[in-house]
Amino acid sequence: MKQNSNSSRKGKRNTSFKAVSKSAKGKHRTQNQAGAKKHFQKKNKSQQSKNSDPQRPSPNAPARANSVEVESYGVRHLTVDARFDGQRVDNYLRRLMPSLPKSRLYQMLRKGEVRVNKKRVKAESRVCAGDSLRLPPITLQAGGTFVPARAIDAIKQAIIYQDDNYLIIDKPAGIAVHSGSKNQYGVIDAVRQAFPDAGWELCHRLDKDTSGCLVLANSRQALNTFQQLSMAGEIHKQYLTLVKGTWCANELLITTPIEKQAISRMNDRGEFEQVVEGGDSETHSVFTTRENYAKTTLMQVVIKTGKTHQIRVHAALNKHPVAMDDKYGDFKWNRVLEKLGLPRLFLHAHTIRFKAFGEIIHVAAEMPDDLQHFLQEHC
């Protein structure tokens, strides 16, 4: 009897929730009908609450008003304005269509969809005033690159000099000069939206975390003039920076070539590639002591060459890295500075001076409040 009891217990099936074969309508039936009914009642209540939620749109509801709008164009024929005489074709197209992906832009050039005076052109070709430009049918995001209103207002308030040829702003730290994969917008996008009727172009660059004087030109002639002055070493740029330790020499000229470094950059085909810069190129940095503190030194730096990260590299090579430099600096020291409240790289483009069109332009941007506050509190 005992053996039979065990065998019957072992052979007993659990039928509390057993799925059976599908019916003709494709629905599952279960033996636990009460449990299934309770389950579907909860599901129906949940679905009803979602449908009644005013914040949740119905599947058949029209798109929201703030959805991305697009603009479609057929074949267009444009005439190149005199302001852009001599500009590269790809840069000119990027100015005309800032929201167009770069990959599509360079594809248009490769396939010959863009014509200048009825001829195919390469990305590095130059446009001339009065050229006839043909653009293919294309769809663009309306409004171009989105720039928040607060950023446009900040750029307007940052203007420290403006004439018919040049615009100089005190660039805030934390905003790149160009938009990119990691930057939704840049200074140039904000400037163009703040002054849509002008033709501003960047004359040079500053790192994203560097503040201070940034120059833009309003014409190709003004841009070429600035670049020629820069190549001739006739533009005076002075920076302020805080470095680690006590800088012994009151003035020091550093001409050490910057080592080669790989930088990710977009080529003419709209593809990212590693480009090696630096090496045997001439560099010229003059470091002058402004103020000695207990464990740091405030330095004035004048550069006549503009190599990538030149000041930061030269300071690090001299064993006095720039405060909060996350690439060449002292990482342990940076963490200490961060805890003390230094929010970013301590590098500021203080003054710029050059002569163009018979006029001497000399502009200074005062040290920002965040850097001044740190000096007063901790140096």
Image: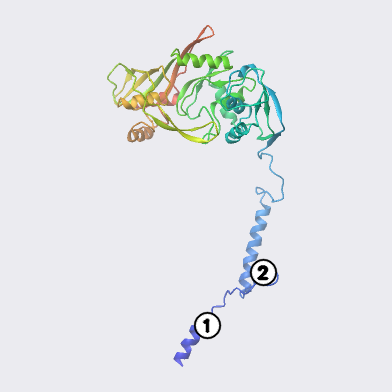
Residue 154: image tag: none
Query: What residue is disc 1 on?
Result: 12
Mark 1 Cα-neighbour bin, 10 Å: few <14, some 14–19, many ≥20: few
Residue 146, horizontal then vertical, whole percent: 60, 32
For the point 43% across and 26% down, which residue is it? Answer: 370
**Badge 1 or badge 2: first in the primary sequence:** 1
Q: Residue at x 54, y 8 (%)?
A: 357
Three-letter code for the amino acid on which mark 2 is drawn: Lys
Residue 203: x, y in percent?
52, 20
- Residue extending farthest to the bottom is 1
Residue 186: x and y in percent read: 54, 29
Q: Which mark is residue 27?
A: 2
Q: Quadrant of residue 319?
A: top left
Disc 2 is placed on an element classified as loop
Left/right placement of residue 113 relative to residue 375 reads right
Task: Classify mark 2: residues with Cα within 10 Å, few (<14), some (14-19) or many (20+).
Answer: few
